[in-house]
Amino acid sequence: MALIDKAIIHVQSGDGGSGAVSFRREKFAPKGGPDGGDGGKGGSVYLLVDPNLGTLRDFQYDRRFKAAHGENGMRKQMFGSDGRDCTVRVPPGTLVYDHETGELLADLVEPGRKAEVLKGGRGGRGNARFATSTRQAPRIAEQGEKGSSLTLRLELKLLADIGLVGFPNAGKSTLLSALTKAQPKIANYPFTTLSPNLGVMPLDEFTACTIADMPGLIEGAHEGKGLGTRFLRHIERTRVLVFVIDAAVARPDQELAVLERELERYDPALLSKPRLVAYNKSDLLKAGAKRKPRALYVSAKEGTGLEKLRAQIAKQLKKADG
């Protein structure tokens, strides 16, 4: 699936209910005391990490989220009901920013984590709360506290086991489709991949790993050239990097060096991740062409060398787990 990795949403918490001004009036207590109940609390707004989500696509259509207001207090010291909270589900890896100030409010990674981004308004106290020995018939109550609103910027840093990194036309999308059941757009021109694509590759009968095909990088990507830093940030949360190099180019090692340099300039920590180098398009090598010893040569198009690559990926994932 193509990844939607940015969204702007508007959230609003509920108003608190107002307290009631009421006095007990019954047959045998015509001058009963104050019995106005408190208002209910307004609903809060939470963000919840849902492991079944992998994109911010839903927020392209639904951008406003509102919690319910608390009910007003009632006579006989009956409290108003609290307003229903609003829970917004987001995929793992979502960064939550205050859109106005740019402040990072939450970094939501762990499935099931719930973060409160707006608190509901407090309910007002009814007049029963204000009765004292010297003020036995108070005719005052509090208004409920107003809720608040906020514009949030959501940014997704992809969470994937494997990140495929390479130049445009290195064959990353073809390799992704060969290793998984993903069906990314494939064509013979640069920047076919305009957003990361995801696929799932079985490792054995019981386990699998997620693979992300990153849009092609070029020299100067760390400065925003080409597709720039918009997608370099997704690489930060992959566990293992697989550099995909076109084996048929004149200087494949030079391409590898450029890719490593771009990642290092963006974030030196990226090169501390376990990584592999897969020389793709080996079917285009001329007969007798020199090959690097112990290097992984594959052909995503022909399906050769893929089992060895899968085995090496599984080995590196174990290494990443420590």
Image (spheres, rainbow, N blue to C red):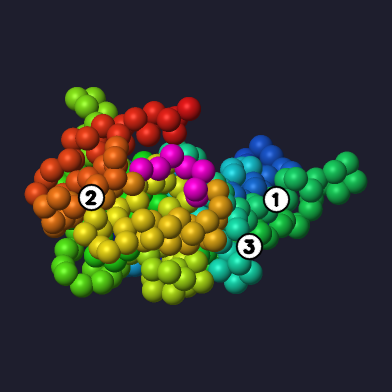
The amino acid sitting under disc 1 is Arg
Q: The N terminus appears in which quarter of the rendering?
A: bottom left
Residue name at image x 39 percent, y 46 percent? 241
Residue name at image x 68 percent, y 45 percent? 35
Disc 3 is placed on an element classified as loop
Mark 3 vs mark 1, foreground winner is 3
Residue assigned mark 2: 290
Residue name at image x 54 percent, y 61 percent? 265
Numbered tag placed on residue 86 in the rendering: none
Residue name at image x 90 percent, y 46 percent? 134
Residue 306 appears in the figure: yes
Count up the numbered dots. 3
Q: Give the Cα distance between marks 3 and 1.
A: 34 Å
The amino acid sitting under disc 2 is Lys
Numbered tag placed on residue 125 in the rendering: 1
Residue 272 belongs to the span the image colors magenta: yes
The amino acid sitting under disc 3 is Glu
Position of 251 with respect to 282 (left or right) is right
Residue 77 belongs to the span the image colors magenta: no
The 10 Å Cα crowd at callout 1, few under 14, some 14 to 19, many 20 or more, is: many
Measuring from the top left, give residue 307's x and y in whole percent.
18, 35
The 10 Å Cα crowd at callout 3, few under 14, some 14 to 19, many 20 or more, is: few
* N-term-proximal mark, 2 vs 1: 1
Q: Give the Cα distance between marks 3 and 2.
A: 53 Å
Span shown in magenta: 270-276
Answer yes or no: do the residues labelled 3 and 2 have beta carbons within 8 Å? no
* N-term-proximal mark, 3 vs 1: 3
Residue assigned mark 3: 103
Q: Note whether 52 is above or below 226 in the view shown.
A: above
Disc 1 is placed on an element classified as loop
Disc 2 is placed on an element classified as loop
Residue 81 appears in the figure: no
